[in-house]
Image (tube, helix red, strand yellow):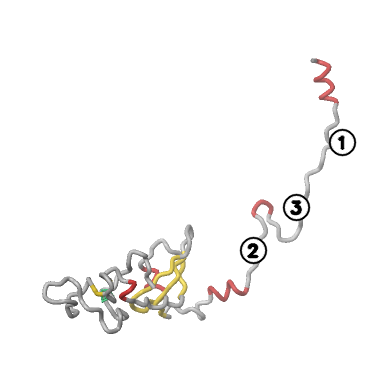
Amino acid sequence: MGRYLDALKNKKICGGDEPKKPKKPEKGGLLGFLGTPPPTFENNQAANDDAKQPDTAASFAWLIHYSDRDPLPVSFAEAMTHAEALAGYPDAVAAEPIAPPPPIETSCRDCRHFAKPGHSSGYCAGRDDLPLAYGANHPLRKLPDDGGASCQHWQANACGKES
Ligand code: SF4
């Protein structure tokens, strides 16, 4: 056993007689373990330029940015400024205006109140202001002339279609 340890102690591991010298860091811009300072891009400066995105600009839709999760698209009933849009999201770090989503196209055929008994063309089971389908006390109503395109009582049917 003693001979084996002596052999290990005398074995040359590095291949040379002198120990390896540590690599010297590159010169010019390297700050050691702090890394190289990031370059400044013109696009970054343009994005932060208040003259291009004034806080007074209003939009109906904003993309809310967070530091720890995906951006959240948000729509408002009224146009909101940057500060107003961020006011409701205290965890957000930034917001950018985006195009508002297209309006939902409603249709009786996609509504959960749509009923189609037998071979009928369909009736409404959700509104009381429409004419009765068959007579007094009948629960179904005739469909509106616009097919539900402007109905304020429309709700997505069980298939989940909402647009
Ligand atoms: S009239 Fe309105 S509530 Fe009734 S089925 Fe059509 S969309 Fe739905």
- In the rendered view, would you say 16 is above or below 108? above
* Closer to the camera in the image, 146 or 139: 139
Mark 1–mark 3 distance (CA, rounded to whole Å)? 24 Å
Dot 3 alpha-carbon crowd within 10 angstroms: few under 14, some 14 to 19, many 20 or more: few
* Closer to the camera in the image, 34 or 125: 125
Q: Is residue 105 left or right of residue 33?
A: left
Looking at the rendered image, the disc whose residue lies closer to the viewer, 1 or 3, is 1
Q: Which residue is mark 2?
A: 38
The residue that appears at 51% across and 80% down in the rendered structure is: 52
Mark 3–mark 2 distance (CA, rounded to whole Å)? 18 Å
Q: Earlier in the sequence, mark 1 or mark 3?
A: 1
Q: Is residue 48 left or right of residue 87?
A: right
Looking at the rendered image, the disc whose residue lies closer to the viewer, 1 or 2, is 1
The residue that appears at 28% across and 78% down in the rendered structure is: 151
Residue furthest to the bottom = 145
Q: Which residue is mark 3?
A: 25
- CB atoms of marks 3 and 2 within 8 Å: no
- In the rendered view, would you say 132 is above or below 24? below
Please state, as top left, top right, bottom left or bottom right, where the N terminus lies in the image.
Answer: top right
Amino acid type of disc 3?
A: Pro
